[in-house]
Amino acid sequence: MTEEQLRERINQFSRSKREGKIKLVENTSEFMNINYDDILTLEGSYYLIRGDETEQRFGLEGQPKFWVKKAIDLADGSPKIIKLVFHESLYMDIGGYRIKYFRSPIKEGRILEKVKEDQDFMQGITVYDSAGNTVRIVDKILGSNLYDFMFRQKMDHETYLHNHFLPIFRNTIASFEAIERLHEMGEVHGDIRTDHILIDRTSQRFKWIDFDYMYEWSEHPLGLDLLCLGNILLFIIGKGFYHISDLAKCGPEGEAVLASIRKEDTSLFSINRIVNLKKLFFYVPECLNYVLLHFAQGAEVPYESVREILEDLRACEESSPFKRMSQNLQN
C-alpha cells in the first residue's frame, strides 16, 4: 500500500484521524520499540498497533507484555493479537521434580496450524518478519477468561454447585476433550491455567489460548498438562481455590476443619492448596471428589492421560447428584 492508502485505512478503522508521518516496522526484534500507532508490515499485510497486551497471571495483573501487541488488520479492520518472539525460561518445583519451562514461538506456530478451524482453540497464522522472526497473528476472542468469570459468581458455594455448576462442568469437559486431541497430535499445551481459557461472548464456548510454553519433564511428558487440568477442575468445583492458611482465619469452625486436614488432602501441584473438597463442603458429589483426589499428594494411582480423566468425569453425569443438578437447571 502507498502511504496515502494506509492513511485512508487507518482513518477508516480507527477512531481518530491519523496525521503526521507513518512509521512502518518490518523487523520486530526490538519489540520494546514498537509503539501505539506504528504499523507492522508482515508478508504483504499491514497491522496498526493499538498498544500492549497485559498479563493476567495472578499477582502480575495489569503488567504490560511488551512482546504481545494489540492490533487492527488494515485489510478488513478485524482485531488481532500479535505475538512476537520473546525467549524466556524458568523453573518450577512440582511433586519433587524440578521442571524447566521455556517459550517456543515455533511450537505455538506449529500448533496453530494443527488446530486450524478447531473452535476450541484460538485461531491464527504464523508469518515471518524481515529478520526471520516467528510472528503469530491471532484472532482476538471477545469474552472473559474463566478466572474472571468464576469470580463474578457471587452466590454461596452450595447454591452455585447445585444450580449453576452443570453448564460450566459440561464446557470444561469439552475443553478437556480439546486437550486430549492436542495430545493425540503429539503436542502439549504447556501452560494450562484458568486465565488461558477464554469464554466466547457469543457462543459461550471455552477456548484455549497461549500455547507457546514447552517444558522438560522426561519422566512424565504429559504430566504437567494433566496436573494443570486438575487445577482447572478444582477451581470450577470449589468456585475458587482454598489454602490451609485460609482455614486459620475462619475462627473455631475453620480450626476444626484444619485439624482434620492431612498431607494427602492437599495438592501435588501446590502443597498448601486443599484438594479434598469433601472436608470443606460435605455436599460435593463423591464422584467429583474421587477425581480430585487423583491430583492430591496422597494419590496412589495418578492419571496418565486426559482420556482417563474424561472417563471418570463422564461417569459422574450418570450419578444421582448430577441428575438433580440437571433437574434444577431445567426448572
Image: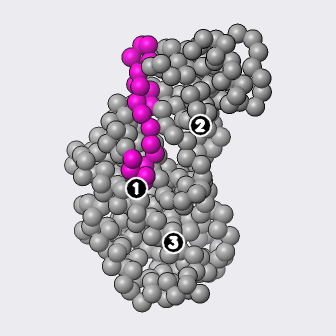
Q: Which residues are magenta?
A: 117-136
Magenta span contains residue 130: yes
- Structural distance between the alpha carbons of marks 2 and 1: 30 Å
Would residue 218 be counted in the magenta stretch? no
In the rendering, at what x and y percent does residue 230 appear?
A: 40, 62
Task: Choose top left, top right, bottom left or bottom right for residue 38.
Answer: top right
Q: Which residue is mark 3?
A: 167
Near-viewer residue (331 or 60): 331
Is disc 2 in contact with disc 1, using a CB cutoff of under 8 Å?
no
Q: Nearer the viewer, residue 274 or 112?
A: 112
- What type is the residue that disc 2 sits on? Pro
Q: Nearer the viewer, residue 299 or 108?
A: 108
Residue 79, which numbered label?
2
Type of the residue with mark 1: Cys
Mark 2 and mark 1 lie on one chain; the one further toward the N terminus is: 2
- Mark 3 or mark 2, whichever is nearer to me: 2
Residue placed under numbered mark 1 in the picture: 228
The tag earlier along the polypeptide, 3 or 2, is 2
Q: Marks 1/3: CA distance? A: 21 Å
Query: Tag 3 or tag 1, which sits nearer the N-term?
Result: 3
Report which quarter residue 245 is drawn in: bottom right
328 lies above or below 13? below
Q: Residue at x 52, y 88 (%)?
A: 327
Where does the image place residue 29, in percent across and percent down from the top left? 48, 17
